[in-house]
Image (cartoon, rainbow, N blue to C red):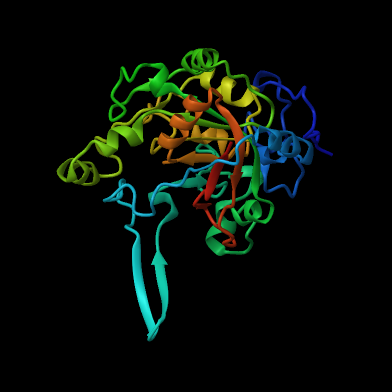
Amino acid sequence: MLMKFDPNSKSLPKRADLPEIPGAPPGAAWFWGEDDEHGRLNLLTAERIKAASGLIKYGHVVPLNLPLDFPNPPLFNREKTEHTLKHLAPGAFDEVVSCNPQSGSQWDGFRHFAHPPTKIFYNNLREEEILGRTSTRCGAQAWAETGIVGRGVLLDVYSWAKESYDPLTTYSISASDLVECAKHQNTTFEPGDILVIRTGWVAAYNKLDEAGRQKLADIPFFGEQNYVGVEQSEEILDFLHDNYFAAAASDCICFEAWPPNKEKPMIHAYMLPLWGMPIGELWDTENLAEKCKKEGTYTFFFTSAPDNVAGSVGSRPNAMAIF
């Protein structure tokens, strides 16, 4: 019988000390149960949620979703959001909204990305299950059924770095950058935190004119798109794993610096299939950063209500920070 972690524990093993799981890829942390679909979200226990609610001081809400049609046009050849009004009768309307959740503000779910060498998804989910629709296992509907609620932490790296880099280039944010940013903000981490990183990507994109946005959209998926994100390094992997964040998100389009270096560890390939750690991308951190600076705190009560779509690859985050 496999080891099972206690989600309330404050002494879970570091990445270097993870025991091997027979039949699993090296470095897998599938220790929440054979039928688990939540991964690191198991850390969001009732005790931690209750404690996080104490961060609500003013009743102020900061939504973290960008508009459904942002960025516009979509990047990486993804589909554009379509919104159609249906006039049912005088004084009555319906509507139809069609979108690719990966085109804008999103959670990457466990069905989004497999461990590249083995093609195995989180908790031994196989591609055949997804393609054959034989189950909805590890779809983001599991998160919708519980919600994602806890202590949110913002690292405003772009402000800490004094906006000294261009977020529309392949700029890599190191583990030491994140640690120093946290120290500068007087921010500490707790197991189960939802980490949010402001890289400045949205701020930079908002400065582009229509032609500049179209130029980015015209570049093929594996073309010369270059974006800020966390560094591909063992140090970043240790930072993300060993702090036992429940999830991590940012305002940039790929979370990790793009394009990825094939000679270095791809962060998605660890967080999603090996650790079961949701990744948020293209979140609106502009108002959040302003609010945190104003209040002098970079921690907040966090809520997310993922869409309840059986077998989903990901979801709109529908996330809010509450102060």
Q: Tell me if 100 is positioned left or right of 147 in this view.
A: left
* Position of residue 85 measured from the top left corner of the image (x, y, whole percent): 35, 74
Question: Which quarter shows the C terminus?
Answer: top right
Using the rendered view, name the quadrant where residue 302 is placed. top right
Q: For residue 30, say whether it is visible.
A: no
Q: Which sits in the foreground, 267 or 164? A: 164
* Residue under the image location 73 percent in, 22 percent down: 13
Q: Tell me if 224 is positioned left or right of 261 in this view.
A: left
* Position of residue 254 measured from the top left corner of the image (x, y, whole percent): 41, 37
- Residue at the limit of the structure toward the front, as seen here: 58
* Position of residue 231 measured from the top left corner of the image (x, y, whole percent): 43, 22
Question: Which quarter shows the N terminus?
Answer: top right
Q: Is 91 drawn above or below residue 256 in the view shown?
A: below
* Position of residue 93 measured from the top left corner of the image (x, y, whole percent): 41, 78
- Residue at the limit of the structure toward the right, as seen here: 1
Q: For residue 149, say whether it is visible.
A: yes
- Residue at the limit of the structure toward the bottom, as seen here: 89
